[in-house]
Image (tube, rainbow, N blue to C red):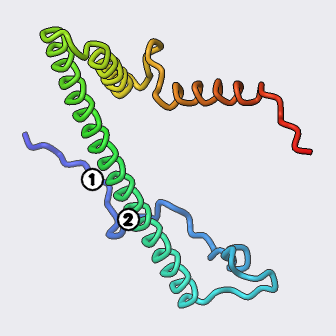
Amino acid sequence: MLATATPATTMSPMPSRRRPKSSPAPQSGTQPSGASSAGTQLSDAQRFAQSLRESEEADRRAKKAAADAKAEAEQAKAAALEEANRLQRAQAAHQRAVEMVKEAKRTGKGRAEADAAWREAKADLLELETGKRPAWAARAAEAAETEDASADLDVSDEQPADVD
């Protein structure tokens, strides 16, 4: 038996539109923000020039931001290097102070000076490592200020001499 063919639906040579046709949008409602309210519209060349200017300005801002970020990174790198150098100098000073204390103990001379040098070096090292100076270590500047203040108090206690 032969199969009987059913007639297939015919396809049109062009596909149908999926969207209905619409009338072109009115140009008066789509004015750029730079256009005046008097109804003047920017020509294509003017819009292109404006777009080009805005693009160039954005590129300049991006370059400036990149340069600023690079400069900031360089400053951070220099600060980190300086901090590392300060820490290394403090560690070396602390090691010298420890050697001075050992030598003072061995010889029995200069013990107080060596101990004071060790305390100062240790306080400086701890301050650099932790960011906070130990409570037991007064700064040299603070000690000098307290001595100056006490000297000022002694001077102010004196009575002024009569110069008649």
Residue shown at 92% from the left, 45% from the top = 164
Residue 163: percent from left, percent from top: 87, 44
In terms of depth relative to the viewer, which is nearer, 108 or 130? 108
In terms of depth relative to the viewer, which is nearer, 15 or 126? 126
Residue 8: percent from left, percent from top: 27, 53
| Mark 2 secondary-structure assignment | loop
* Left or right side of 105 for 116: right
Residue 90: percent from left, percent from top: 27, 30
- Residue 43's label in the rendered image is none
Residue shown at 47% from the left, 26% from the top = 139
Report the residue marked by disc 2: 15
Using a 10 Å C-alpha cutoff, classify the residue at mark 2 as few (fewer than 14 neighbours), some (14 to 19) or many (20 or more): few
Which amino acid is tagged 2?
Pro
Report the residue marked by disc 1: 7
Using a 10 Å C-alpha cutoff, classify the residue at mark 1 as few (fewer than 14 neighbours), some (14 to 19) or many (20 or more): few
Res 38 → quadrant: bottom right
* Left or right side of 111 for 55: right
